[in-house]
Amino acid sequence: MNRKAQIRMTETVAVLFIFFVLVIFGIFFYYKYSQISILEKQQELLGMRAIDTTLKILFLPELSCTKGDAEPEDNCFDLSKLGSASSVFGGSAEHLSYYFDIFKYANITVHEIYPDSTNSWTIYDKPKVIMEEGREIKNWKDYESTFFIVTLREESEGNPKYRAGYLEVGVYS
Amino acid sequence: MIKNKQGQMEMIGLVVIVILITLGMLFMAQFALKEDPAKKVFTRKGLAYSTLSALMKTSAYNEDCVNEYSGIREVPQLGKKILEDCALNYATKEPGLNACGASCIFSCREKHSCVFLEEFIAETLEETLGKWGKSYELRSVVLVPGTDFPPELILIKNKGGCPKTKERDSSGSFPIHTPMGLVESELYICD
């Protein structure tokens, strides 16, 4: 009788042991899964911010092409506006603070593909950094960039000509 | 009484197993039904539209594309004059052909407008979408009235293109009117 009870006890302990192993395995799996999904969510939010910034820049009157009556053209930047963009966006502390409210920590560059692929314009560059002993130290974990193909309009002798280029918007987290 | 109790215990065990299996299935379903991140879809769709719209607008700066009359230099746009020239002369399109003859208005890079367009657009797309790891497919057809199979003016495919079986996004149709009929261009982007 005693022996039978002992066997039953061992059986119960074994079942409980397996059950708890399964539960621990489940908890571990769930923990890993939530960790990955949090990272994915962070990445997605950063991506959304990159898109947001891209949309803002694509429709920014300071850069976009306009036809006669100030009707904006899709996915087009005016070359003459691009040329003076860096001084507009980062001209003074007031300008910097105004554009920081719009773009936050980001890097916005327009590259020309055709006809001259060596041309590029950095419009805005505000990396996330901290100052330590007078030196700038990188303080971002992630950098997400989005690309959009655009045309660059140049006006000469009343005839608009379009170059091909792309907009690169990178955001820091 | 003892047998009844044993039966109850077995039932509880069974319920626990069923719950565990259900939880596992739910997890698997969550993985399988996970939607594409919004960024991916937006980027693909927006990129397809912006790419084709930019390409169609781009001017051909090559010296041999530029027309000069009455002292005015006209730099033709790819999606307008050159595509129109290609549509008008598509019957004489042959790969590697140097210029298309007297009927053509343009002979950029000394080539038939269709050949030039295909070459130029393929280069530009490779430099951008190709570098960014995207697969794409660009097609331009001329809708000639009374024809069931519209002639293909341009066909560019990268990494096997974007067949319907792949998850793809389209730029939408970019039509232009030409004397030959309506020319429709469309760009597909897939991952």
Image (cartoon, helix red, strand yellow):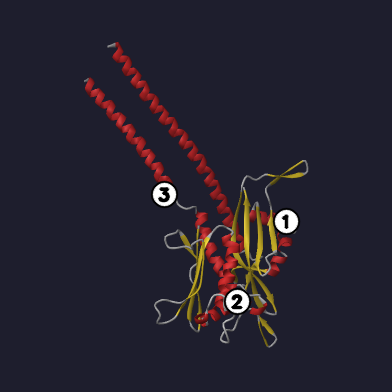
Q: Chain of mark 2?
A: B
Q: Determine the image quadrant of residue B6.
A: top left
Q: Residue at coordinates 59% horizontally, 73% vertically from top-left? A: B57
Q: Is residue B98 above or below residue B31?
A: below
Q: Is residue B183 left or right of residue A7?
A: right
Q: Secondary structure at mark 2?
A: loop
In depth, the one of B170 and A59 nearer the eye is B170
Q: Which residue is mark 2?
A: B77
Q: Is residue B128 above or below residue B80?
A: above
Q: Is residue A31 above or below residue B132?
A: above
In depth, the one of A65 and A15 nearer the eye is A15
Calculate the distance from the C-alpha at mark 1 to the C-alpha at mark 3. Answer: 48 Å
Asked whether the residues under marks 3 and 2 belong to the same chain, the reply is yes
Q: Is residue B22 left or right of residue B93?
A: left
Q: Residues within 10 Å of mark 3 (few under 14, many from 20)?
A: few
Q: Is residue A123 left or right of residue B116?
A: right
Q: Residues within 10 Å of mark 2 (few under 14, many from 20)?
A: many
Q: As drawn, which residue projects farthest toward the bottom?
A: B70
Q: Residue at coordinates 58% horizontally, 53% vertically from top-left? A: A49
Percent from the top left, x then y, of residue B17?
33, 33
User: What label sits on residue A94 in the rendered view?
Assistant: 1
**Residues marked 3 and 2 touching at CB (< 8 Å):** no
Disc 1 vs disc 2: which is toward the camera? Answer: 2
Q: Which residue is mark 3?
A: B33
Q: Kindly identify the amino acid type of the residue bearing the numbered disc 1.
A: Glu
Disc 1 vs disc 3: which is toward the camera? Answer: 3
Q: Kindly identify the amino acid type of the residue bearing the numbered disc 3.
A: Leu
Q: Chain of mark 3?
A: B
Calculate the distance from the C-alpha at mark 1 to the C-alpha at mark 2. Answer: 40 Å
In depth, the one of A49 and B166 nearer the eye is B166
Q: Chain of mark 1?
A: A
Q: Determine the image quadrant of residue A170.
A: bottom right
